[in-house]
Image: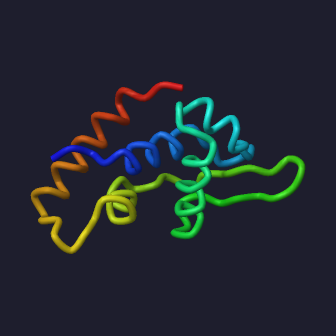
Amino acid sequence: MKLNKTLEMAIKIVSVLGPDKPTGLREISEKTGCTYNYAAQIAHKLVKYQVIDSKKGLHGGYLKYAKVPVSRLVNIFARSSRTSAPEVIAIERQIERLLDQISF
């Protein structure tokens, strides 16, 4: 099973965020190679599901909460009623390999 692009970008976005200093959307877009609008769409969904936090204002941006479980991202972006348990496990393994490769 192949990772969907949105899940892959969500992982990259979460990976570039820190817990202390907000990261702006333009910087997220540059670091992940994601378009600004697509990054905004994914970030909005991550905020909605309380995976990341957003701060408004001049020095605003996005912050990562404490460690984000991979299974949470899978449930938000890749899970459907037709996804079987073995498929979810395969997706989680692919995500772990992707996280090992990411270095910003």
The mark total stands at 0
At x 74%, y 50%, the residue is 61
Residue closer to the observer: 102 or 44: 44
Horizontal side of residue 82 vs 32, given as left or right? left
Q: Furthest residue to the right?
A: 58
Residue depicted at 59% across the width and 30% down the height:
31
**Horizontal and vertical percent position of residue 41:** 56, 56
Which residue is depicted at the point 19% across and 58% down?
88
Determine whether 13 is above or below 79 in the image: above
Residue drawn at (53%, 31%) of the image: 33
Position in image of residue 84 (x %, y %): 12, 65
| 13 horizontally vs 76: left or right | right
Q: Is residue 75 above or below residue 87?
A: below
Q: Position of residue 97 (x, y in %)?
A: 28, 34
Residue furthest out toward the bottom: 81
Residue 40 vs residue 74, the one in the foreground: 40
Which image quadrant: the C terminus?
top right
Residue 2 figure quarter = top left
- The x, y position of residue 39, in whole percent, is 57, 47
Front residue (pair 69, 14): 14
Displayed quadrant of residue 95: top left
Colour setup of the view:
rainbow
Residue 80 placement, left or right of 29 = left
